[in-house]
Amino acid sequence: MITATDTSELQALYEQSLRGITEGQIVKGRIISLTAGDVVVDIGFKSEGTINRLEFANANELKVGDEVEVLVENIEDEQGTVILSKHKAERQKGWERIITSYKEGDIIDGRPVRKVKGGLMVDIGMEAFMPASLASMKGYANLDGLIGQSLKFIILKISRARKNIVVSHRDYLLREKDAIRKTLIESLSVSERRTGTVKNLTDFGAFVDLGGVDGLLHISDISWGRIGHPSDVLNVGQSLDVVVLSVDKQTSKVSLGLKQLLPSPWDHAETKYPVGTRIKGKVVNIVPYGGFVEVEPGIEGLVHISELSWTKRIGHPSEVLQVGQEIEAQVLAVDAKNQRLSLGVRQAQGDPWQTAAEKYQPGTKVVGRVRQLTDYGAFIELEDGLEGMLHNADISWTRKINHPSELLKKGRMVDVVVLTCEPDNHRITLGMKQLTDDPWPQLVQRFSVGSVIQGTVTKVAGFGLFVEIAPDVEGLLHLSELELGPTEKVEERYKVGTSVRVQVIKLDELERKIGLSNKNLPPESAG
């Protein structure tokens, strides 16, 4: 039988058990009943507490008598019920565990549990937020596909005031990649062979993934032969063996080679292409000083501009060479050690000067093509690889030639006569006026000093006029011998084509000059 004293003692013990429970405290309780929406828990308080069933991941497995840890949210609401939360208890315990064991920058295990605006909530013992941009290394990942996966994260930020944590899976992946890269870089050694995958192609080469480190395979190290672009021989995603050429562990830069896996064609160049050998090749590049000719894949020789022709004065190799052109050349020198091959085109064609002395004796009349015009004359091509020089002074007996373009046109065929031939000096001089007799002896008789002639102005200059007094025969009417009014200017009074009456006042047969005047002319005869 319970006495009043027993009742008083029990009441005291009961009240004593209630004094330690406060809002926000985590306590242990025991499930005393289950309803469709709630779980009722006895926490040793005067009233039982309730928890929404949704807070239990294993709600269907719960049974009366199970022990649970809960957080006291409200000791008594308006109905006198104690409000408990299992979720907040777990969050509080998780928060305390994390701030005790982890700091910003640490790696932590977690599992994305639900999608929210801007990212995912991640269960790391409490819920942390991961922005969508930090879910993967490349852009935005498929967030739905990450939910439920066990992943690793980097703690980016811990806000103690708000009890918030921001995590990043992307930063973890980058850290892992960097660690793999450093390990791989340390393991690489020059000359070793590795297998990689072509990751990207550029104009200057290909980037090859060696399993965490990208190495550069320069275009010059892809093939011994010349290639226009890496895509000519490689494809993205292709697996290939390469050799490590260099490793910079400070910058993590790796240079790779592909052609080095094969013997160099230069190894046999000196025996295969001795000096004097005639070869056929394709012009692959033209530069101001010559042309590069591919003899075989990996071996290119230089034809210097001076070795293109025996006689032609070539200003640029493109005058006789074109990229893609097949040519024949002769080996002049070979240096396999420095990978240099000197070629000559003219040597393969033969030296036309060897027979020039016999073919082009002085006095021989020939037909040639005007190849080039210069201020001092014209180069006349006599045959392929052989040309002669026609000086301005040898173009006309009577006409003063300032530039050969006055009478000659590039590409035109002309008759000339050989004046000199010097094969040893590679020089032939030609004449055009020598094809006809010198008219000066007749001109001296026809245009004696004092004779008056009707001529035509051919040129107006500051110092006077040039007047044609016979076909291709000009005389100078100097300003001092020109009839002009006090205020008249020569260019206003006289025009090209104007007919003018002049008198011969000077005839220099040695200098082949005729001086004229139109001052104080004798009157024209009436007859």
Image (spheres, rainbow, N blue to C red):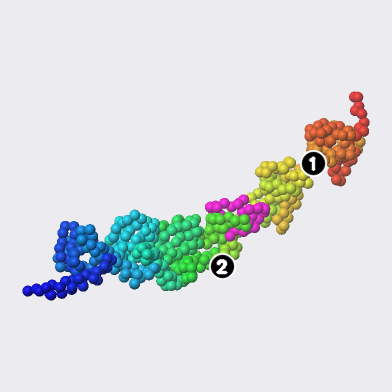
- Measuring from the top left, give residue 272's x and y in whole percent: 52, 65
Taking 228 as reference, is 479 left or right?
Answer: right
Residue at 22% x, 58% y: name it.
78
Taking 127 as reference, is 266 left or right?
Answer: right
- In terms of depth relative to the viewer, which is nearer, 1 or 54? 1
Residue 84 in the magenta stretch? The answer is no
- In terms of depth relative to the viewer, which is nearer, 110 or 75? 75
Q: Earlier in the sequence, mark 1 or mark 2?
A: 2
Disc assigned to residue 338:
2
Residue 30 figure quarter? bottom left
Query: Element at badge 1?
Result: loop
Mark 1 vs mark 2: give the one in front: 2
Taking 427 as reference, is 98 left or right?
Answer: left
- Measuring from the top left, give residue 415's x and y in whole percent: 71, 43
What amino acid is found at the position of numbered circle 2 in the picture? Asn
- Residue 56 visible in image: no
What amino acid is found at the position of numbered circle 1 in the picture? Arg
Looking at the image, residue 316 lies above or below residue 438: below
Residue 318 in the magenta stretch? The answer is yes
Region in magenta: 302-329
Callout 2: few (<14), some (14-19), or many (20+) C-alpha neighbours within 10 Å?
A: few
- Residue 256 visible in image: yes
The residue identified by callout 1 is: 399
Disc assigned to residue 254:
none
- In terms of depth relative to the viewer, which is nearer, 404 or 509? 404
Query: Element at badge 2?
Result: loop
Query: Which quarter of the rendering shows the N terminus?
Result: bottom left
